[in-house]
Image: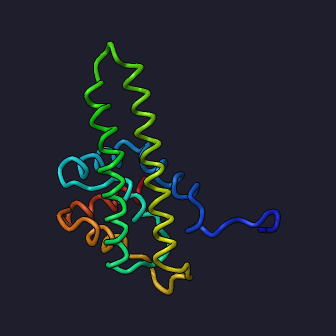
Amino acid sequence: MPEAGDTPEPATDFDAFWAFADALWVDPTVRERLMRWQDEFGVDVMLALFALWYPQPLGPSQWRVLRQTARRWQSSSTERLRALRRRLHTPERNALYRAVLALELQSERLAGLQLLAEARRLAPQTTPAFAIDRQRRLHTLFPDLPDAEIRDGLREFTAA
């Protein structure tokens, strides 16, 4: 059992990831870019946020496994909730729309938990000997995302 006052390593602390994701998401410029990536390039926003945050090194094949994990969850849960929520977006169904939006957010949170659990399973935690290349991560995960989008997005994410 940890000693009182011990803090978990960043890669083991889901709350650190969720706070990071939330801090980026509340920035309107970042949110607009992530939504454009999702709508125009099929980017899984939660996976992109996870790739930007995850402080441990993973190889391309490990990131591809994480992409498969994310795809399974997206197709079985989050995408279904999102489609339902969008159909409910009418003034007379606002309360129901909000309830499904809350479910969709919980589904995104569960996706993040799954990504963290899978990343831990894929590779033991180490102290990185080099800086994490977030541009390479995003390119590995989303090969259809143009390099200029990645470069400009990283600039905006850093500014946020």
Q: Residue at x 40, y 31 (%)?
A: 100
| Image spot of residue 57 (x, y percent) | 45, 78
| Outermost residue toward the right in this view | 4
**Which of 26/155 is in front?**
26
Pick whichever, 110 or 19, lies toward us: 110
Residue 140 x %, y %: 27, 72
Residue ranking furthest to the bottom: 129
Could you tell me which residue is drawn at 32 percent across and 12 percent down? Answer: 92
Name the residue at 43% across, 50% down: 24
Of residues 69 and 146, the one nearer the viewer is 69
Taking the spot 27% from the left edge, 36% from the top edge, the residue there is: 83
Q: Nearer the viewer, residue 63 or 153?
A: 63
Q: In this picture, is 38 found above or below 4? A: above
Q: Position of residue 131 (x, y in %)?
A: 45, 79
- Quick one: quadrant of the N terminus? bottom right
Query: How far from the left and from the top, in percent, is residue 147?
Result: 20, 67
**How has the structure been colored for display?**
rainbow
Residue 27 relative to residue 125: left or right: left
Q: How many marks?
A: 0
Image quadrant of residue 16? bottom right
* Up-down relation of residue 56 to residue 86 (above or below): below
103 to 35, vertically: above or below? above
